[in-house]
Amino acid sequence: MSSTHPAACHVTLLVATRKGAWLYHGDAERKTWRVDGPHFLGHIISHLVLDPRDGRTLLAAAKTGHLGPTMFRSTDFGQTWSEAARPPAFAKVEGGVGRSVDHTFWLTPGHASQPGVWYAGTSPQGLFRSEDGGDTWAPCSSINDDPRYLEWMGTAQDGTPDGPKLHSIIVDPRDPMHMYMAMSGGGVHESFDAGRSFAPLIDGLEVVEGFDVTQPTFHDPHCIRQCPANPDRLYQQNHCGIFRLDRPATRWRRIGGGMPAEVGDIGFPMVVHPRDPDTAWVFPMDGTAVWPRTSPGGKPAVFVTRDGGEQWQRQDAGLPAEQAWWTVKRQAMTADTQPSVGLYFGTTSGELWASSDEGAHWHCIARHLPDIYAVEVAERPAT
């Protein structure tokens, strides 16, 4: 693990929920939290993300009830908001009815060398780009209309809760032309031309028994993360287990075999250490039989690996010991970059949990929020 640590800064948690968004501002020790919110009360907020290039611009992916999908922007860290002039929307089809965006699901700031550039993934699956800080959006990839990709995407009734999604948009910090993205369903894909075209990256991944593993249609990646300390390493939480890929290899390797048999390696979120590529965390759920999507046995726990997935250890100190039947969605777990890494997750029962010692101990920051869809960290220099 690197001995280089970031300068002191304040941590704010950006919490997106089924009924609005909240900001939780931590003190210097991350022990007490000041709540700011709700913002957009009643709106479905799928993702709330800070632009790390300016430290003040926030984007919120929203669905406003009967008014449909939109985007909100703040250039003063959430003090005031404005609606995007042109939210993500598929190109109109001449003489016919084309696809329409149900909601924007995922937001990713562009490369550090491209201020103002953002990417958005939608449901149904589509990839969009903004070059003006999220005010106007346009389709940016051939996949939106590629017949092969439309086949791999399936239909809006493919069984994915709240519809199929394009997510895990990753821009390589070394090269703005190199990107990854994932589709649930539809597989993992890689681009070398800033997202204009993609190629499948699914070798070694598994699918539900009885389906063709060679077809992207049947692949369901849940969350992919690139290691900040080693961008050639990717971790993935998949519908069928935990996987790792070390480039330039193109074949994923399942690394969830060390998880306890009674827990399994099925889940949604994936978090990687900011400085140690061998350390990663998952939050498993009950993926048996009818997929109840609850913590296994009603006993929630985070699991950590410190050797790249060979071994996993349970971290549940402070979490409920029994009768806690919630889980954590794919965007609802994250980490900060402090010397002792802070971990945070939000639950389907509206609780926000934190650890300031890399998962060794947990405490609850907030209760009784709506169903939490996403949790992100915003770090700003201490003054």
Image: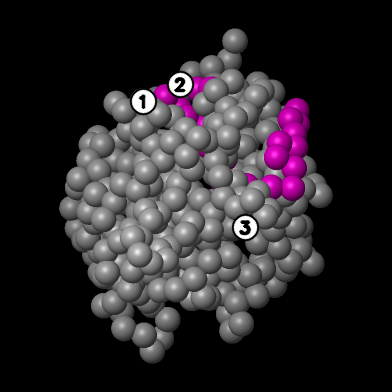
Depth-wise, is mark 1 or mark 3 nearer the camera? 1
- Sequence-first disc among 1 and 3: 1
Please tell me whether residue 198 is drawn above or below residue 264 in the rendered image: above
- The reply to whether the magenta stretch includes residue 15 is no
Task: Give the residue at x 65% y 61%.
Answer: 327
Q: Which mark is residue 54?
A: 2
- Indicate which disc residue 282 carries: none
Dot 1 alpha-carbon crowd within 10 angstroms: few under 14, some 14 to 19, many 20 or more: some
* Image point (19%, 47%), residue name: 192
As measured in the structure, the alpha-carbon distance from the residue carrying label 3 to the one carrying label 2 is 29 Å
Q: Earlier in the sequence, mark 3 or mark 2?
A: 2
Looking at the rendering, the stretch of residues picked out in magenta corresponds to 33-56
Label 1 to label 3: alpha-carbon separation: 32 Å
The residue located at (64%, 51%) in the rendering is 67
Label 1 element class? loop
Numbered label attached to residue 115: 1
Using the rendered image of the protein, determine whether residue 351 is visible from the camera's viewpoint: no
Per the image, label 3 sits on a secondary structure element best described as: loop
